[in-house]
Image: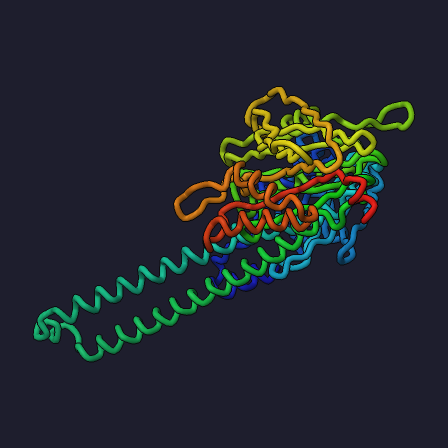
Amino acid sequence: MSDLDRDLLELFGNDAPLASPDAHFLEPMVRALEEVPTRRLVLVGRQGETLAAWTAPESDPDFPDTFDWATLAAPPDGLAVHHRGDDRGPCVAIALEDPYVGPTTLVIQLVSEHDLPQVESLARWITSLGEMILHQFRRDEEVPTLKARLDQMARQQETFRQEHARIVAMNLEEHDARINEKRFRERLQREVSQRTRELRAHADELLRANRRMERDLAAAARIQRSLLPREIPRVKGAEIAWFYQPCEELAGDSLNVFRLDEKTLAMYVLDVSGHGVPAALLSVTLSRVLSPFLDQSSILKRRIDRPPWYQLVAPADVAESLNSQFQSERALDQYFTIVYGLFEEETCRFRFVAAGHGGPVYLPASGTPKILSVPSFPIGWFDAPTYTEQVIELSPGDRLLLYSDGVTDANDSSKQGFGSEGIIRGLTEQRDKPLASALDGLAQRVLDWGEGSPVHDDVSMIALEIRTEESSTSS
């Protein structure tokens, strides 16, 4: 029994809401492993109990009843492979940790042994996503029950208060004929005091639950930040900087800069609709999908049968692949926008696609800044929209900025937006500063635009500059 189950059992008795198998908690993991041939996903508690389970339609229905889950152990912070010895495929056990659910194991039953290397290469993303699913699982189970009991106790206290007032108002002579007033008052006062103590105890429990959720959100935010760029790749003849600030503990924005090969750098900024855990789960899933690893599920690289044995996928094709994999769920009203581009070092060309996202800001070394806007639909709105690739030739001294709508939609006290004009004005005023300092200066202007009010959306930016001969020599 988990710590959460034990706490609720002590608080409510045998009516405590214990966790039950429910496949919808594993839907983000099913999406993340969409390209990995998988028979089953099972979330197993510390006693071997099944917390949540998902089964592929074509899988053997007898498997959950005939397999001993207690044997599927994984070392802390690790991964273990269990070979079943039959034709049902191996099981991969990944250890997860939640401070209140306790040690938990995510079991992935694969179709064949050949899929093991692909799952092992994704262990880091699977662990991060699994721990965020545990947080959402406990949050959905714990808080509504506590709130319902708190409301029930409040109603009971109000009933006793009304009964007390009614009896006091009665004619004392008539009341004395039925019951001794003093004893009745004492009994009623004891019951009201007892209910009041219980109500306060449940209010304290709700406060502790809120504090636990705040700690969980902070831990999940650290996991999400670990997926941001740890260091910017060195680029010959160019410089790159980035800025990221979520408006809440968990963000719907994500960005990254990474190498696809020796001559090409990829970068993106994406924005998931909404905030909180649902947006963060989709954001983490997308960071895994948009990874540079060359495997069967990669949408950035594809294998070919001639040297160099791979081919980089064009930005417009990447957007179309994302759209086919992530169709918007109408019930959740969840979708995302993205600007994704490839920087070719030898030619200084930047090829990009913007799917429902603001186009990059182009600041030439000499000339008028402009927005490279390309009208298009967000990812997931329609079944098969057409996305168009754009190309811009960059020269020494030119700068390029990718950003999320948290920059342009920032409002001042009069509800006036920062807008693309604010970006151009801020970049122009910071033109003589080094790229990283200029980006920090622009971010500060965005944060100051609200005149002390907190920002209401995530702020994400990536900046690229082509070095001049003078700056290259000094660096």
Residue 104 lies, in percent from the top left, at 68, 54
**Residue 170 vs residue 385: left or right?**
left
Q: Which residue lies furthest to the right in this view?
A: 307
Q: Is residue 316 above or below residue 150?
A: above
Q: Which residue lies furthest to the bottom in this view?
A: 182
Would you identify the image quadrant in which residue 24 lies? top right
Q: In this view, does 223 lie above or below 417?
A: below
Closer to the camera in the image, 269 or 174? 269
Question: Measuring 39% from the left and 69% from the top, which residue is drawn there?
Answer: 200
What residue appears at the point 27 percent right and 63 percent down from the top-left corner?
Answer: 158
Work out whether 116 lies above or below 11: above
Residue at 54% over, 59% down: 214
Q: In this view, does 368 lie above or below 234?
A: above
Name the residue nearer the viewer: 453 or 56: 453
Q: Quadrant of the N terminus?
A: bottom right
Percent x, y for residue 248? 54, 51
- Give the quarter of the image for residue 41: top right
| Image colouring | rainbow
Q: Nearer the viewer, residue 433 or 99?
A: 433
Q: Residue placed at 61% from the left, 32% from the top?
A: 368
| Image mark count | 0
Q: Where is residue 4 in the image (x, y as percent from the top left)?
A: 57, 60
Residue 6 appears in view: yes
Q: In this view, does 138 lie to the left or right of 300?
A: left
Q: Where is residue 136 in the image (x, y as percent from the top left)?
A: 57, 49
Q: Which of 136 and 372 is in front in this view?
A: 372
Residue 299 at least partly seen:
no
